[in-house]
Amino acid sequence: MTHVLDEAIALEQIGPDRFCGRTTEPYANMIGPYGGITAAVLQNSVIQHPDVLGEPIALTVNFAAAVKYGSFEITARPVRTNRSSQHWVMELSQDGQVAATATAVTAAHRDGWTETESQMPIVPEPHDVATGTRSTAEWLNRYEMRHIGRPGATVADPFYLDGESGESSHMALWTREVPPRPVDYASLTAFCDVYFPRVFVRHGKAVPISTVSMTAYFHATKDELNHHGDDYILGVVHGDAFRRGFYDHVGQLWSRNGTLLATTHQLVYYKA
Amino acid sequence: MTHVLDEAIALEQIGPDRFCGRTTEPYANMIGPYGGITAAVLQNSVIQHPDVLGEPIALTVNFAAAVKYGSFEITARPVRTNRSSQHWVMELSQDGQVAATATAVTAAHRDGWTETESQMPIVPEPHDVATGTRSTAEWLNRYEMRHIGRPGATVADPFYLDGESGESSHMALWTREVPPRPVDYASLTAFCDVYFPRVFVRHGKAVPISTVSMTAYFHATKDELNHHGDDYILGVVHGDAFRRGFYDHVGQLWSRNGTLLATTHQLVYYKA
């Protein structure tokens, strides 16, 4: 049986560097599909491109407009191929209008001196943390989310928004797909966007938001992703600044064994 | 008199969305020009575009190949213009070959709830910190750099590489241009790349490196940049992970009064 994520990121080649896909109901968000799935299908346009070399190491997606439900076209062009890296430019359009732009880099990893400087925080095991429940959008049912709580909250409930601005937007979260699916670079891209908006946490209020730009750096090799399998991913996220309509979001995604799978950043529009 | 930075980022329009520029000697690096100046000229292709709306809020530059000394062409296309934001796709090419790809978002800031979560570290004032001297590349003479030292080093000298891997790549640095120049979004882009490579600091060795992808989020409005003027900028940087040929670099750029001007991220190739 095909996993819902694979259905959502499926692409059909319709010309050189041109692919066609369509939005799927399981990833519906409030306005258009979940941004993480749009990022994942853009990542997939590179992964499944006949000319791809190497593994994804960097991806940036700019969300130019809400994606409408239905079909979309992606162009994915390898604009420069070097000895051990390849540079990609992508565009997602609907009815001739650009809805998202993206760039990606794929490369060959090389063995050598390797150190992870950031440390995975010490947190309870996934099964010792309650699963959150909310049903404000269909895509939320695609992820099991176990929030470790927002610092300073009296309950380990990120959805407990008391209308008071706090001191911190830091949060940790165990998450995996429903049903579980072995992680790969496309699904890891989607995981980069699952976190509850930082402005809600910091400001203590749900306000209108929309991701403007999202970048992910993939630190794990394909072997490390295979080793991770379908186990929980620990997300650790915070925002540096919430200033005049835009805030940033800085995240790390960890394997339970302390492997840093990816780091991710977003710039998000908010109205508050 | 024109500042050297303005000479380096100058562009001449040669067609719709097409501009021509050339590398300048003051920003020469070891192989091709300083990456920060390439990022700045790509940012400038948007800023000086006749159709631009709003202020830069996000920029990603992917360095596909070393830029050769001489002239280059930049295409900068506004692919989507919304009510309060505009999405850009840029490409820098030489002899018909892509040397860098980029995307940018410009937008109007809006007043409203504003908080800076990250804190500027408490550090000595710029004039209480020694200026570094090194002359390995011409562009380094364009910046006055006052390194606050690498944690754990016995001397406040980031260039003291003892060949021993340390525990931390964290560093802070006061910097401004030589001669001083009032900061704007183009020069702020160039400031995002001035920091000594994190792998040198963490690994205790100079090794071959090359920035693959760089993203900057601009948190300051034009008014805040005007208020900053040509004063020193405090850079605070570290790397999360150095893994199999690629490391990331996470930076914050602060005004002396505690305004967070920008946050920046890089993915960098290294050989060690």
Image: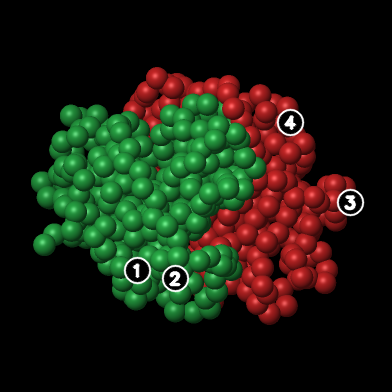
Chain colours: A green, B red
> Is there a contact, CB below 8 Å, between mark 3 and mark 4?
no
Left or right position of A272 against A6: right
Q: Is residue B262 visible?
A: no
For disc 4, the marked residue is B229
Q: Which mark is residue A231?
A: 1
SS state under label 3:
helix
Give the residue type at disc 4.
Answer: Gly
Spatial separation of the CA atoms under disc 4 and disc 2: 46 Å
Spatial separation of the CA atoms under disc 3 and disc 1: 50 Å
Left or right position of A102 against B115: left
Give the residue type at disc 3.
Answer: Asp
Q: Which mark is residue A256?
A: 2
Badges 3 and 1, same chain: no
For the point 21% across and 51% down, the residue is: A9
Q: Residue B251, relative to residue B185: is it above or below? A: below
Query: Is residue A180 or residue B36 the one in the foreground?
Result: A180
For disc 3, the marked residue is B128
Q: Determine the chain carrying the residue at label 3.
A: B
> Is there a contact, CB below 8 Å, between mark 1 and mark 2?
yes
Q: Residue B65, relative to residue A134: is it above or below? A: below
